[in-house]
Image (cartoon, rainbow, N blue to C red):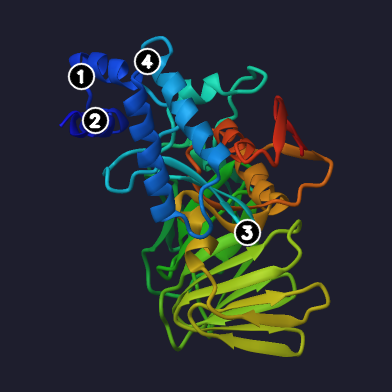
Amino acid sequence: MENNIFQELLDKYLTGRMTEQEWKIFSQMLKEPEHESQLEAIIDTELKEHALEGEPDNKVLEGIQNQLQQHIKADGKRTPTFSLYLKRMAAAAVFALTLAGVGYWWFVLKTPLKNEVAQANVPDKNIPIPPGSNKAVLKLGNGTEVMLDSLTEGMLLQQGQAKIIKSGNGQVSYKITGTTPAEIVYNTITTPRGGQYQLTLADGTKVWLNASSSLRYPSNFSGKERRVELTGEGYFEVARNESMPFHVKVNSIDVEVLGTHFNINSYKDESVIRTTLLEGSVKVTSGKQASRLKPGQEASVIANGDIKLQDDVNTEEVIAWKNGMFQFKAADIETVLRQAARWYDIQIEYKGGISARFSGQISRSANAEQLFKILELTNKVRFEIHGKNIVVKQ
C-alpha cells in the first residue's frame, strides 16, 4: 500500500498536481532507503521499456536519480531539473538517457523546462540563450523592406491584385482580389539566424521557412508554371494545379511538383542539398540528371551535381524543425550543433574531436543551455559558454 502511495505522489509531482500537504509527505518518503530503491526500479523499468536500442547505463541511471532527488531535497522546491521518462504518466515533462551501440542517446519530451530551472544550469552563469522566434524581413519588388515581427496583425499593403496580410503566429498570406492579368512583382521573405516564418502564396501553397533562409516568389502566379527560389531550408505544401506545375529553384537544382508535401534543405554549411518527399511526387533535376521521388524517399545532390536516392527516410526527423522540435538519430555532434547554431544564433568552436553520436528530441522552445546540459550528461562532450560563443570540448 505504501509503495502505491509513493508512486501516486511521484505521478502528481511530475505532473505538477501535488498539494503542499502531499509535498511534505513525498519529501519525507524520498529520504527513506526503500523508496530510493523503488524510484531506481521505476527508472530502470521505464528506460528498458522505451529505449530504442541497448540497455540503460548504470552511471546514467544513477545520474538521473541523483539529479531528481537532489533537486527535490534542495530548498523545498518542487520543480525538477530533469524528470523521469514515464510514458504511462500522461503530461509529464520527462527525460531519459540510454547508452546505445553508436553512442549515447538522449530524450526530452515536447514540454520545455521552466526558464528559472534552465538559468540555474547555466555553466558560467551567463544570461540564458533564448530560442529563436517568428521573425522575418519582407523585401518588396520596389526594394522596400518590412520587418514582419514588429507589425501588428492585419493587411500590410496592396500589391497589384494581391493583398498582403499578416495573421497570428508568424504568418503572412497573399489574397488575390482581381481576375485580370497583372504585372508580376517578385518579393523575398528572409528569416535571420534565430528566426522562422510561415507564408501562404497567392495560389494557396503553404511554405514554412527555417532559420537563416529565404524565399523569392511572385505576388501572383500566371502563365504555364509557378516558380520560386529557395535558400536555406523550407517545407512546402503545394496547392495542386496540374495545368501549372510548381517549381522550386535551389542553386542549379530544380524541384518540380504538381501538388505535394516536401522539404528542401540547402544550407551552404551542409555537405549536400536534400529534397525529402512526404506526400505526392516530385522530380529533382540537376544538370542532365533527373530523379522522380516517391513518398519516404530523399534525393541528395552532392557537390559535383550527382543525385543519390535514399529510401525509407525518417521524415519525422527531417521536418521536426517545422513541428517545433530538434530530432536526431545517430547524428554526430557537428550535425546537432549546426541546427542549434542557426536556431539560437550562436557561434560554435570545437576543441578536440568528438566521436559520439546522439539521438533523441528536445523542444525548440528550450533555451540553448538546456540542450547543452542534456548532451553533457553523456560524459562525451562539454560546453563552455561565453555569451553567444560556445566552445565544445570532449
Name the residue carrying label 1: 22
The residue mark sitting in front, 3 or 4, is: 3
The residue mark sitting in front, 1 or 4, is: 1
- Residue 321's tag is none
115, above or below 291, in the image: above
User: Callout 4: helix, strand or loop?
Assistant: loop
Cβ–Cβ under 8 Å for marks 3 and 4: no
Of marks 1 and 2, which one's residue comes earlier in the chain? 2
Q: Is residue 216 left or right of residue 199?
A: right
Q: Residue furthest front?
A: 34
- Residue 101's tag is 3
Of marks 2 and 3, which one's residue comes earlier in the chain? 2
Q: Quadrant of the C terminus?
A: top right
The answer to whether residue 192 is visible is no
Dot 1 amino acid type: Glu
Cβ–Cβ under 8 Å for marks 1 and 2: yes
Q: Is residue 358 left or right of residue 166?
A: right
Front-lying residue, 393 or 291: 393
Dot 4 amino acid type: Lys
Dot 2 amino acid type: Lys
**In the image, what residue occupies the spot 35% across and 40% down?**
42
